Image (cartoon, helix red, strand yellow):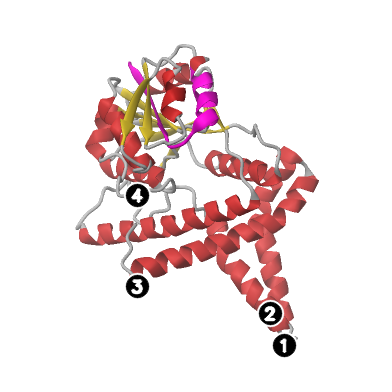
Amino acid sequence: MIFSLIIPVHNGGDILREALDAVQQCSPPPAEVIVVDDGSTDGSDRVAAEYRVRVVPIPGPSGPATARTRGAETAQGDILVFTDADVLVPSDLFLLLREDFSREEVSAVQGTFSDYCPFGNFCSVYKNLYNRYVINSLPDWIDTTFTSLTAVRRDIFFACGGFDCNISTPSVEDRTLGRNLIRYGAKILLDRRIQVVHYKELTLLGFIRNQFRRSRDLAKLLLRNRKDEQKSSSSPKSFDPKGRFGTNAPSTMARIPVAYLGMAALIASYLWSGAWPVLMICLGTYLGLAYPFTGYLVREEGLGFAFVSLPLNFLDAVVSGAGVAWGVFSFIVFGKRY
């Protein structure tokens, strides 16, 4: 069993150095480390050259999907391990992956996030815990991938179609690998023992941009899936034609219409007293939908953090709703599939 670790980078700088330092601590180490330099202008290729890695330059930026695919094409291993330039992998990564892939039914393995956040600002901690909560809420066998840490058998990666290289931005390109794996009939194991550290600092503005972009692109992805399924006379039983990819739980998605209905009721309450009951119902419903994640925050960071997170949770729903709306509008009206 030969492991090839593939890391795409575009202007990763010192964060790439942190990621490669973590790789050097792995025992056993991977057979090879491939850093795909996606048109960096900050000397990321020189940073990578300081380590015992293979640097594969490509003209760019072409996007992480293209960079990962190029890395996979040059890899020698029979297990392709994808991570990002801002992710610190655990030292026992390849020991755990060897154990997972010793099971014949496992086609791919998905890791999760550590509860440790290198940055102490509120948005970074909140987003890291949210990502960890979402992934850890999934069952053991999942229908999605997040390339913070995804490993897949090489032959299955190419047989299923890999990433959708038409996606040129770092957004939902990792979900397309999960979609293609499930369509192919592959099985993806979630190994909660594999916990990576996401070395990413988010400001409030960065958080808003990130949520809007991902929601917009996810809406387009789901619409593309629906069209693809309509063109196909049959689809594998294991594929979910609704395109949920395991992460858009009903309580998460339901926050969006409830948030907008609540805002409409708040505005209407200034003109009509009869809107107050609707506003109270929306408030209670929203808090109920947010309760599972809020309860998780209480356990992880305490009551104060969880209480302060509620406005950010609401902002997330509003921004995500706007992203979904724009994604649907641009897809249908302007024909922008990507």
Q: Which mark is residue 73?
A: none
Dots 3, 1 in contact, CB < 8 A: no
Q: Name the residue under label 3.
A: 333
Classify residue 226 by image quadrant: bottom left
Residue kind at label 4, given as amino acid type: Ile
Residue drawn 68% across and 44% down? 296
The answer to whether residue 287 is left or right of residue 185 is right
Q: Is residue 255 visible?
A: no
Residue 287 on the magenta span: no
Could you tell me if the residues under marks 2 and 4 are in contact, i.e. CB atoms within 8 Å?
Answer: no
Q: Does the magenta stretch include residue 17?
A: yes
Along the polypeptide, which appears first: circle 3 or circle 4?
4
Q: From where the camera sits, is residue 249 visible?
A: yes
Mark 2 → mark 4, Cα distance in angstroms: 39 Å
Q: Which of marks 2 and 3 is nearer the N terminus?
A: 2
Task: Give whichever of discs 2 and 4 has the lower sequence position.
Answer: 4
Taking depth in this image into account, of 129 and 62 the one nearest to the observer is 62
- How far apart are the two marked residues, 3 and 4, measured between alpha carbons? 19 Å
Q: How far apart are marks 2 and 3 (CA)?
A: 29 Å
Residue that carries the numbered disc 2 in the rendered image: 267
Q: Quadrant of residue 241?
A: bottom left
Give the quadrant of residue 221: bottom left
Marks 3 and 1 sit apart, C-alpha to C-alpha, by 34 Å
Q: Nearer the viewer, residue 265 or 107?
A: 265
Q: How many numbered circles does the render carry? A: 4
Q: Is mark 3 on a helix, strand or loop?
A: helix
